[in-house]
Image: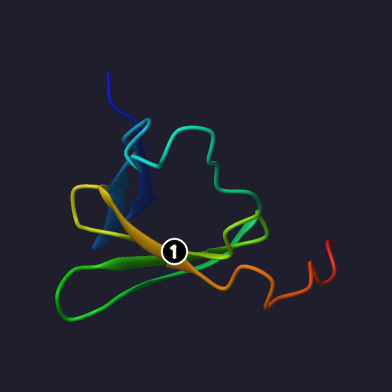
Amino acid sequence: MSVILGSGEHRYRVVDNWAKLPDGWQLTDVASVAVDSRDRIYVFNRGAHPMVVLDRDGNFLRSWGEGLFSPGHLC
């Protein structure tokens, strides 16, 4: 059974393990997500690889920002 979140026009189906990251990688405390005109998903997180880029199917494309960002505040 799939889980649906949101309401009205803003409803989303949860897909477990959608992001296919390299072995040993994980997304930690995701702070922001954006999508570009080519359906690439940009995930900014507080993990070892701050900016992770995925395609629309969740396949890993690249990462950047290692060593550029401090962890910042955690509420």
Residue assigned mark 1: 63
Q: Secondary structure at mark 1?
A: strand
Q: Is residue 36 left or right of residue 42?
A: left
- Numbered disc total: 1
Residue 56 versus residue 13: which sits nearer the camera? 56
Extreme residue in the left direction: 38
Q: Residue 42, image x and y in percent? A: 39, 68
Extreme residue in the top direction: 1
Please give the name of the residue rendered at 33% of the width and 39% of the height, measured from the top-left corner. 20
Which quadrant of the structure image shows residue 61? bottom left
Q: Is residue 60 left or right of residue 43?
A: left
* Above or below, 51 relative to 16: below
Please give the name of the residue rendered at 69% of the width and 71% of the height, measured from the top-left corner. 67
Please give the name of the residue rendered at 22% of the width and 58% of the height, measured from the top-left corner. 55
Q: Is residue 7 left or right of residue 40?
A: right
Which quadrant of the structure image shows residue 48? bottom right
* Above or below, 15 relative to 66: above
Q: How is the image coloured?
A: rainbow
Residue type highlighted by circle 1? Ser
Q: Residue 18, image x and y in percent? A: 32, 38
Q: Residue 39, image x and y in percent? A: 18, 69
Please give the name of the residue rendered at 58% of the width and 65% of the height, measured from the top-left corner. 50
Of the 4 image quadrants, the one containing the N terminus is top left
Residue 49 versus residue 37: which sits nearer the camera? 49
Q: Residue 37, image x and y in percent? A: 17, 81
Of the 4 image quadrants, the one containing the C terminus is bottom right
Q: Mark 1 packing: few (<14 Cα in 10 Å), some, or many (20+)?
A: some
